[in-house]
Image (cartoon, rainbow, N blue to C red):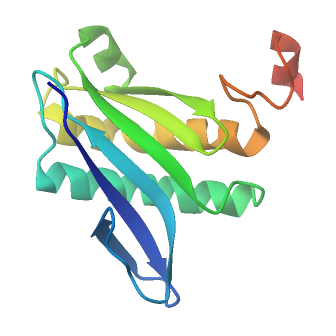
Amino acid sequence: MFKALSLALVLGATGTTTVALAGQQVVGAQSAVAVSFQAGETHDYTASERALISDILNQAYQITKADFPQLADAISVELHPINRPGVDALGGVTGRAQRPGVLVLEMSVTYPGGPEAAARAGLLRTGLHEMHHLARGWTIENNAYGPGIAIAAA
């Protein structure tokens, strides 16, 4: 059985960040990153994990947007807990730019110290990498350049 909780990181006019549950309105603010936390058989993200993950993804978004202004003004992230110890060697996080504006990230529940430790170890790096793919149009679905490795040099 899978459950999902969506949170949105909201950037206020003063640069403050607010975390809102999906459906909540925040007056005078624009949502930058909407995270859908997927619950798996072995893990359901806690409130502290959600807050840390959302903060790191917002940081990745702000850094990427500064370097790649063409990055969409709002993106969605699906975050899945995984029980795949091989990902632990990568910092506990892997992912892909699924389609324009959408990232799919997977976080190891077997990473030493759990998902919070994995978030601290690998989420910023993976978020930056995958958001740069979004900004460049390099996505699994609806790739702006069509098929082939030649796009890597673009």
- When the figure is inspected, residue 96 is found, relative to residue 30, above or below; the finding is above
The foreground one among 144 and 17 is 144
Relative placement, left or right, of 143 versus 7 is: right
Relative placement, left or right, of 148 versus 83 is: right
The residue at 76%/61% (across/down) is: 69
Quadrant where the N terminus is found in the figure: top left
The residue at 31%/9% (across/down) is: 86
The residue at 31%/26% (across/down) is: 92
Relative placement, left or right, of 3 versus 59 is: left
The foreground one among 130 and 112 is 130
Residue 134 sits in quarter: top right
Residue 105 sits in quarter: top left
- When the figure is inspected, residue 116 is found, relative to residue 90, above or below; the finding is below
Residue 9 sits in quarter: bottom left
* Residue 130 image point, x, y percent: 58, 36
Q: So how many labels did they put on this image?
A: 0
- When the figure is inspected, residue 50 is found, relative to residue 133, above or below; the finding is below
* Residue 31 image point, x, y percent: 49, 68
* Residue 101 image point, x, y percent: 62, 45
Quadrant where the C terminus is found in the figure: top right
The foreground one among 4 and 137 is 4
The residue at 59%/36% (across/down) is: 129
* Residue 85 image point, x, y percent: 24, 11
